[in-house]
Amino acid sequence: MILVTGATGHVGGELVRRLVAAGEPVRAMTRRPAEARLPEGVEAVYGDADDPASLDAAFACTEGAFLMSAQGVGTAPGPTHDLALAEAAARAGLRRLVKLSVLDGGAGADVIARWHAQAEAAVTDPSPGFAWTLLRPGRFMSNALQWAGQLRAGDEVSTPFADRPAASIDPADLAEVAALALTTDDHAGATYELSGPQSLTPADELAILGEALGRDLRLRPVPDDAARTGMAHYGFPPEVVDAIMQRTLESDRGAEVLPTVEKALGRRPRTFAQWAREHAGAFTD
Ligand SMILES: NC(=O)c1ccc[n+]([C@@H]2O[C@H](COP(=O)([O-])OP(=O)(O)OC[C@H]3O[C@@H](n4cnc5c(N)ncnc54)[C@H](OP(=O)(O)O)[C@@H]3O)[C@@H](O)[C@H]2O)c1
């Protein structure tokens, strides 16, 4: 049995489908099992990383687990969700664990790096008794879904950092790498930095999405000061806002096309155009 946390999310949802297609027994963790739309045969289990006592039942009798956390950096003194999930995994005595992290993980000195260093160490140190694999992706293609509300209302999208490039990755590719690491021994102890196949700005992605939708979409750039104010308005701690601004504006890290997906899967990573065609309905329904 493989436990997928974040099973209703972009990566976890794709992973559940891939594991089921490969014939693996899958348990899907969610805070709302009754509402989760899961493939036939998948066992839905309640689990809330905010309620560590709920996690033992979710991890019971599993051979492997995919861990992700939706806890925002800086919203707690440390990554308590990652720690609770890693501790539950260790108690369960499972064999293989894949953790979804972020590009560069704990490298660096800012609040984001400190958070992810702790989150990754919870899985890798000290000798946890299971084989672990860390996935460190850059920007997700699915972040474009943030435009869906604006695109249902019209053809214009306001977006920050419109000219900052990233080699965004399809969550489906991440899920396929995770599925391999959960079902074979070839990825034990590996830390994978992952990207998609092209370096694109949000403006480029919007143009490609417009082609998929057959619409002429316009981008209205959000000035950097307004982006900063917006993040503060949404409750991002000031230290986190500073780190995001610095990482986004002063570094091209994340724009580089990395070979990892192709090496692991033996094929090119999926393009933003493919992602856009497959998710076109999300922008119109
Ligand atoms: N977006 C990016 O560009 C990017 C880049 C690099 C790394 N990442 C990492 O990717 C992860 C996000 O993955 P995603 O996009 O697949 O997620 P997502 O689609 O945003 O879904 C969030 C998932 O988290 C679950 N969740 C929320 N609160 C929870 C809690 N208290 N306990 C247990 N589960 C909880 C939700 O499950 P229920 O609501 O069903 O309980 C849902 O399945 C984050 O860790 C992020 O740091 C993202």
Image (cartoon, rainbow, N blue to C red):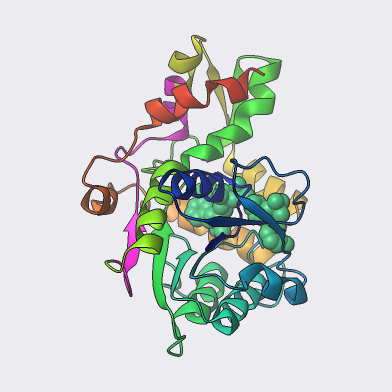
* Above-or-below relation of 25 to 55: above
* Above-or-below relation of 115 to 157: below
**138 lies left or right of 144:** left
Relative image position of residue 185 (x, y in whole percent): 30, 69
Task: Please state the extent of the stretch shown in magenta in the rendering.
Answer: 187-208
Q: Residue 110, can we see it?
A: no
**Of all residues shown, which one is farthest toward the bottom?**
126
Q: Residue 109, can we see it?
A: yes
**Residue drawn at point x = 35 percent, y = 54 percent:** 194
Instruction: Look at the image and say whether residue 152 sits in the magenta stretch.
Output: no
Residue 267 picture quarter: top left
Relative image position of residue 195 (x, y in whole percent): 35, 48
Relative image position of residue 244 (x, y in whole percent): 55, 57
**Residue drawn at point x = 54 percent, y = 51 percent:** 12
* Above-or-below relation of 133 to 215: below
Q: Please give the count of numbered marks on the rendered protein.
A: 0
**In front of the other: 53 or 225:** 53
> Which of the four quarters of the rendered structure image does ligand 1 lie in?
bottom right
Q: Quadrant of the C terminus?
A: top right
Instruction: Look at the image and say whether residue 192 sits in the magenta stretch.
Output: yes
Relative image position of residue 101 (x, y in whole percent): 48, 63
**32 lies left or right of 179:** right
**In front of the other: 114 or 61:** 61
**260 lies left or right of 224:** left
**In front of the other: 13 or 17:** 17
